[in-house]
Amino acid sequence: MNPAERQTSEDAQRGAEHALRLILEVLDRRRTPARLGALFTPTVVESLKTLVNSQPPGRSLGAASLRRVHVSRCAKHSAEVFGTYARGPRIFAVAARLEYRKTARHSGWTVTSVRIR
């Protein structure tokens, strides 16, 4: 892996960890979905709003704590992310797809889909 690819992979890892922490904060109602900004597509924000209004997995067990995050690059500007988070004694899964995008509002990794179990 050349230095540019290594830097891109490290950026994707940091972006994935940041995005998953934000998702967990939204699920715990410590942050509102409207404050997610340009890091998430509007479709993902709407999905998170729906999930927050229902009962997210294990929310009654306590606050979510991100445990592990794995990033698998599938193309130059996209990555698949999967990880685990804890609520009380239980472990749950989260997965997402990130794409590197440059727009007027944001330049960086953007969550284009998410799955929470």
Image (spheres, rainbow, N blue to C red):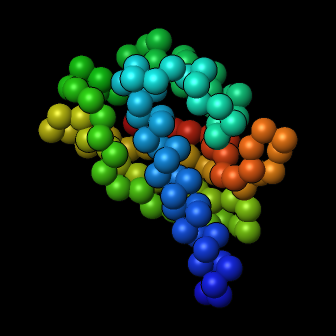
| Residue occupying the far right of the picture | 104
Q: Residue at x 61, y 49 (%)?
A: 97
Residue 13: x, y in percent?
52, 61
Residue 3: x, y in percent?
63, 84
Task: Please identify the quadrant where the C terminus is shown.
Answer: top left
Q: Residue at x 65, y 78 (%)?
A: 5
From this view, report whether residue 6 is shown above or below residue 42: below
From this view, report whether residue 52 is shown above or below residue 6: above
| Residue occupying the far left of the picture | 89
Q: Residue at x 65, y 87 (%)?
A: 2
Question: Left or right of 70: which side holds 9?
Answer: right
From this view, report whether residue 27 is shown above or below residue 15: above
Q: Residue at x 46, y 52 (%)?
A: 17
Name the image quarter holding residue 50.
Answer: top right
Question: Left or right of 87: which side holds 21?
Answer: right
Number of numbered discs: 0
Residue 95 in view, yes or no:
no
Residue 64 in view, yes or no:
yes
Residue 71: x, y in percent?
51, 62
| Residue occupying the far front of the picture | 105
| Residue occupying the far bottom of the picture | 2
Q: Nearer the viewer, residue 53 or 18?
A: 18
Residue 28: x, y in percent?
36, 24
From this view, report whether residue 12 is shown above or below residue 23: below
Task: Please identify the quadrant where the N terminus is shown.
Answer: bottom right
Name the image quarter holding residue 45.
Answer: top right
